[in-house]
Image: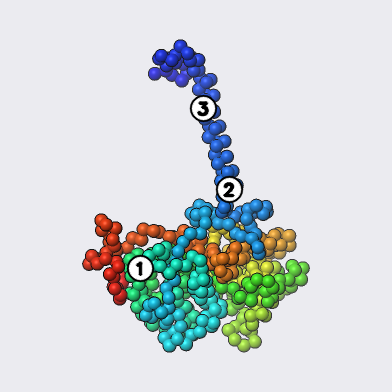
Amino acid sequence: MASLTSNKPRNFGAYSHYATPCTRTHQIGALFLVVSTFFVTRLFDQWFSESNSVTPVIDLRRTSSSYGIKTDNGIIRWPERGYGSHLSLKIYVYDENEIDGLKELLYGRDGSVKTTACLKGQWGSQVKIHKLLLESKFRTIKKDEADLFFVPAYVKCVRMLGGLNDKEINQTYVKVLSQMPYFRRSGGRDHIFVFPSGAGAHLFRSWSTFINRSIILTPEADRTDKKDTTAFNSWKDIIIPGNVDDAMTKNGQPDVQPLPLSKRKYLANYLGRAQGKAGRLKLIDLSKQFPDKLECPDLKFSGTEKFGRTTYFEHLRNAKFCLAPRGESSWTLRFYESFFVECVPVLLSDHAELPFQNVIDYAQVSIKWPSTRIGSEFLDYLTSISDRDIEGMIARGRKIRCLFVYGPDSAPCSAVKGILWELQRKVRHFQQSTETFWLHNGSFVNRELVQFSSWRPPMPLP
């Protein structure tokens, strides 16, 4: 075999008398040509993909409008990788009259819990997601063509208003699930549940037995009960925004308008109850040391020390930075409310996770500070940030806050549209279950070899 270092021309048989001898210089030149062609092709493909893709990734660090970062009349584009080029899914929403017991999860044992009462506060996302999916163009009324199934329930609100106790919630969920053949067929993998509070899926005490494979929508992602255990699985579940008061998120003029930075009285504020939590108590102590910089009243559930809705937002807008420490759990509605009074949110919750992290660069619109470092150095850091930088963060926050508004998926940007994109990533068309089997002709059967079309409720659950 000829060596690459040999100066002797290579012999190619019958064609050798026509060919120019292939020297080492030729070989190096050919190799250079191949490598350069490869890289030029890659650069062209990348440019072509970015310029023609209908869903480029948002980069908040770019200021050009060509990257799809628009607010009121624009759209927020989602990355094609993992999501697809457009929304294409079908969701079946269970009807309240379809399954015995479902009405109890919506309105309580005697039907006395009103939907309007459940729209307030953090419970509201359970109601809003349900209502908006009923109106969605992605809703289907045919179970056989559905990619996903939505199970409506307002159990957080129902429990808080006395409509069901913990035991009744548990029993009713099991009763409802035992009447769902499609839940049994997939082992619950294609079924969606909403749990809108820090308690998460633990409102359903037996969640780990019955819906541990299902898709859970919740604002909580690190821990969901006082035992420090979690019902959140990053592989299948979705973080959703907290439910900000409609009066602040409506189109047009919110009830409380933001103030110019020059007219804000405080550097920072925390407006919430202490609840004996270390981080919150530190903030209250810090506000006593620096009352001109930090507003931090120890608010109560009732009495003169409780803020009304308008008063709360008027105070919230009066600082450049709105502090969001953890409470019973890591998430806080205050983080989302800050965007609507145009105050830079500062997370003081080490384990908090946030929604839509594949399209929002939260480092460009908020600050996260270690909860163990709450002291004068923290205020010194905030003081060091120029108004120009603060205005930049606020401006970028305006562009993405539409993703925290529970509006219809027909809107260019809304929380529900963002949730639909995330749900599209969770669709698995092959719904394997330990209780489902299939035969050579493609039919599905249970352990008794009964075809799926003949399954009758109630069905045994795990």
Q: What residue is shown at x 58% (from left), y 43% (from top)?
A: 48
Residue 8 visible in the picture: no
What is the distance, in whole Å, between disc 1 and disc 3 at their CAs? 58 Å
- Quadrant assignment, res 12: top left
Query: Which amino acid is tagged 3?
Result: Leu
Say which quadrant the N terminus sits in.
top left
Residue 185 visible in the picture: yes
Which of marks 2 and 3 precedes in the sequence? 3
Q: Which residue is mark 1?
A: 182
Q: Which residue is mark 3?
A: 31
Query: Which amino acid is tagged 2?
Result: Asn
Whether residue 342 sits left or right of residue 87 in the image: it is right
Instruction: Determine which of the numbered discs, if any, sits on residue 52 in the image.
Output: 2
Q: What residue is shown at x 59% (from left), y 43% (from top)?
A: 47
Q: Furthest residue to the left? A: 448
Across and down, in percent, residue 227 comes to: 43, 73
How many C-alpha atoms fall within 10 Å of the one at disc 3: few (<14), some, or many (≥20)?
A: few
- Quadrant assignment, res 228: bottom left
